[in-house]
Amino acid sequence: MGVAHPTEIGVEPGVAAAVSRLTVVPQRRYGIWVGTAFALLLAFLIIRAFASNPAFAWGTAAGYLFHPSIMRGLGNTLVLTVIIMLLAIVVGTVIAIMRVSPSPVLRAFAGVYVWFFRGVPALIQLIFWFNLSLLVREISLTLPFLGTLFSVRTNDFMTPFFSAVVALSLCEAGYMAEIIRAGIKSVPSGQAEAASALGMPYRMILKRITLPQAMRFVLPPTGNEAINLLKMTSLVTFIAVDDLFYTAQSIYARTFETIPLLIVVAFWYLAVVSILSVGQHFLERHFGRSDTRREPLTMRALRNAISLRGVAR
Amino acid sequence: MSDVRSENRARFGVPANSMVFARGVRKTYGSLEVLKGVDFDVPEGSVACIIGPSGSGKSTFLRCINHLEKLSGGILLVDSQFVGYDLQGDRLYEVKDDLLCQRRAEIGMLFQSFNLFSHMTVMENLIEAPTQVRRIPVDQARAEAEVLLRRVGLADKVDRYPRELSGGQQQRVAIARAMAMKPKVLLFDEPTSALDPELVGEVLQVMRDLAESGMTMVVVTHEIGFAREIGDQLVFMDGGVIVERGAPREMIANPQSPRTREFLSRVL
């Protein structure tokens, strides 16, 4: 509603006139003007440097933008990101549920998992899994009476792609577990209590009450994790998975067009990150729906504008 | 089932019309003894109000009734049956979770902070337990929920989310949600303590209607007026024991124990 107009509350005419004569003088903010000028100057210098330096070779970069190898690399990067993120969410959820379980053994197991996989750098985990055959020559399942059911040599299935998926999803699951655990903890305990009082068993409470409410808290950091993961997959270059960065590298190793190809790589990472950010925004809106008023923002803004018109000075 | 009840009645001297029957209920957390032997009877269709200072154990006792808290000693029977145990000979076996849930579903509970599921609409809150726990078809559950919402005067709020409702409306929805499971008894844990004073009345009115319809109710409350008007018995708890019990009017007008007198003089 805002402030009532002086005449509506029956102020004496003299006072009303004195009130309506008043004007508000905005505070002078000189620091902001200086800062703005400085930022504009800096932006100008950067753009000029980018545009005038021939070493950037924008034309060459544009030529490689949709190069078939680059497209294949981009495809692999996206596939890796999606597979690893999905696995990380599944494993992370399991670890998070273990971390809040009543059993101290499960809690400790999950704690050690998070401690280890978050503590060791991703690149080292990656190279470790890629070299698993140095540790374990073959993996076999042998049962008494039945003999050996199957046996595979580690090198046959630990391809670069497979090691990348295993290493990075186990590592990412450590981060996801912490995010999901924080989400579960953020749901007030009264929710689970009310559900128990209604006769819902523990598993049902987790599935139908706690986890859906945790989603609201879990989604924003998960979006950030997806973006981080997208960039983290560039590590697989070290074990020769032909992702976006690797294909670019193998082109500029041949042609020495290093900077243009790095620009192409940066462009595609930025493009995908931008799309992910938009998707994250819509997901958050979907899961936050019990939070927001049903009235659309535009309607509210319009109504406020109308109701404020009368009191504008 | 029924012979378990008659067996329990014969063995522990449970009256035939008993809904809640407690003898020597104790509860300890480590070395802290919160309940020090509580005897308590609620006949079917009656309303028992429990008053007492905070920390007196009244909420803990309420939570023992539906086994949200395990007893440390004594027995507690609802409708002449143990909630969390099966009695065989002289041994009380803790029951499996699904059986415990079945029995708990017959005991409704209301909380100070309402605890409506905040990611669900009013209707979803009401049909959640009937459809998920009791496996009632959704259409039937919705129809029953609509009747209950009319009864608490909130038929127009079916598609609202909890945070769009006032505290009083939320607590009325919570009562309807508990009633949707057709409980034998309703437990109220300070149902109006978190409400603005002008919203207390609408919740008490719904509770009054329930009491008049013959619902068995155990109410932990600070609303002495409600206890006097609606309660069939009044219990004053302090320090983990029941200090005094009696008919509400006489007890409020003429408390026997000095502790009861002191407490009543502070809240009245």
Image (tube, coloured by chain):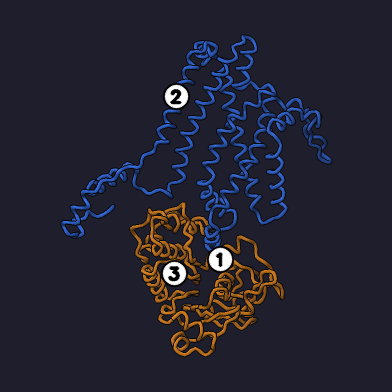
Chain colours: A blue, B orange
Same chain assignment for discs 3 and 1: yes
Q: Position of residue B87 (x, y in %)?
A: 67, 72
10 Å crowding of disc 1: few (<14), some (14-19), many (20+):
many
- The residue drawn where x is 65% and y is 31% is A165
The amino acid at mark 1 is Arg
| Residue at screen point 69% across, 55% down | A103
Q: Position of residue B238 (x, y in %)?
A: 57, 80
Decide if residue A56 is on the left or right side of residue B88: left
Kind of residue at disc 2? Leu
Residue at position x 43%, y 64% in the image: B171
Q: Which numbered disc, 1 or 2, marks the residue closer to the eye?
A: 2
SS for dot 3: loop
Identify the mark at residue A41; answer none if there is no mark.
Answer: 2
Q: State the CA–CA distance, disc 3 to disc 2.
A: 62 Å
Q: Nearer the viewer, residue B64 or B249?
A: B249
Q: Residue at x 40, y 76 (%)?
A: B212
Residue underneath mark 3 = B192
Q: Mark 3, residues whose alpha carbon is within 10 Å: few (<14), some, or many (≥20)?
A: many
Residue B48 visible in image: yes
Work out which residue is located at the far left of the displayed protein and give it: A13
> Disc 2 is attached to a residue of which chain?
A
For discs 3 and 1, the disc positioned in front in the rendered view: 3
Q: Is residue B149 left or right of residue B55?
A: left
Give residue B73's quadrant in the image: bottom right
What residue sits right under mark 1 in the picture?
B104
Q: Label 1, label 2: how many angstroms apart (C-alpha)? A: 70 Å
